[in-house]
Amino acid sequence: MIDKVFNKTISKQFEFDEEVASVFDDMLDRSVPFYKQMQKLSISFANNFLEENSKVYDLGCSTASTLIELSKSSQYNLSLVGIDNSKAMLERASKKSKAFGVEIEFLNADIFDVDLKDAKVVLSNYTLQFIRPLNREKLVKKIYDSLEDNGVFIFSEKLVSQNSFLNKQFIDEYYSFKKTQGYSEFEISQKREALENVLIPYTEDENKRMIKDAGFKHCETVFKWVNFALFIAIK
Ligand SMILES: Nc1ncnc2c1ncn2[C@@H]1O[C@H](C[S@+](CC[C@H]([NH3+])C(=O)[O-])CC(=O)[O-])[C@@H](O)[C@H]1O
Ligand SMILES: O=C(O)C(=O)Cc1ccccc1
């Protein structure tokens, strides 16, 4: 379904509710520059670290597109766990994975409440940005502690620039991108307001600092378009 969530006047904060879940794949595809390419890259980097029966967690799995694509691309039988605190998202995820014949264990829970044991790969695309700072740092430490030796954390995030002049250009570029994707100025500004204090982006350096502080030995930016980036962190 086509995303028209912000085509009407909205006074509440952004939520992953039934309405958002029902149009989510279209929303992500049209709102995140190079979303599909970054998803493909996260899958191919993940595949390099996986073997038979490896355990993979997707934190904030939404409708499970990444885990489904990962399973389809892998030569191995994987143990896949998708975690999301939105019931509406997981209902869709469950239907979709059944339709594709992919076995995934779904946990309708807060990421903080789940034990990520035996993790070889932890994926989290565009989800840390919704976790409050301080908690975000704690979560990344928990991911580090849960990963097996040489395990990897692959994540993508919306970014801000440290430089206020460039930051304004980042925002302008992103809004022109959204216009090319068919969103109106009204929809763009409504969504911006709804996301205020809900989506809290870090700079690229802050993300890398957080990863290093948690103990990861290496962190690389794998892909970047203006204010969106994919990172890989190796334990
Ligand atoms: N504390 C939390 N605990 C569990 N889930 C959470 C929490 N906070 C947010 N979520 C969930 O994280 C997901 C973020 S969307 C991820 C896209 C996906 N990775 C994709 O590549 O398709 C990104 C976006 O909408 O920008 C939503 O489904 C939330 O319900
Ligand atoms: O930051 C924005 O304006 C976005 O639209 C990013 C986004 C994409 C999909 C869900 C939530 C936020």
Image (cartoon, grey):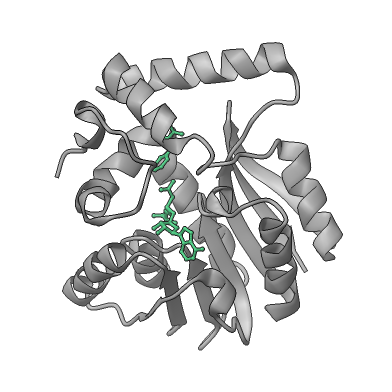
Residue 141 lies, in percent from the top left, at 75, 68
Q: Is residue 55 above or below residue 92?
A: below
Q: Using the rendered view, name the quadrant where residue 151 is placed.
A: bottom right
Outermost front residue: 11
**Horizontally, is 127 left or right of 88 in the view?**
right
Q: Nearer the viewer, residue 89 or 189?
A: 189
Question: In the displayed structure, does residue 5 sit left or right of residue 140?
Answer: left
Q: How many marks?
A: 0
Q: Position of residue 100 (x, y in %)?
A: 21, 71
Front residue of 30/142: it is 142
Give the residue displayed 25% in from the left and 42% down from the top: 26
Q: In the picture shown, does residue 80 fall above or below 86?
A: below
When asked about the image quadrant of residue 94, the answer is bottom left
> Residue visible at 35% across and 23% down?
188
Quadrant showing the C terminus: bottom right
Quadrant of the drawing holding the N terminus: top left
- Vertical comparison of 40 with 49: above or below: above
Q: Is residue 12 left or right of residue 119?
A: left
Instruction: Note whether 90 is above or below 181 in the view shown.
Output: below
Q: Residue at point 43% right, 19% down?
A: 175
Q: Residue 73, how many percent across, how many down?
A: 40, 67
Q: Ligand 2 lies in which image quarter?
A: top left
On the image, the x and y values in percent for residue 24 come to: 28, 49
Examine the image and state in which quarter residue 46 appears: bottom right
Question: Camera-side residue: 132 or 103?
Answer: 132
Q: Is residue 8 visible?
A: yes
Q: Is residue 35 left or right of residue 213?
A: left
Which residue is pictured at 52% across the width and 76% down the height?
56
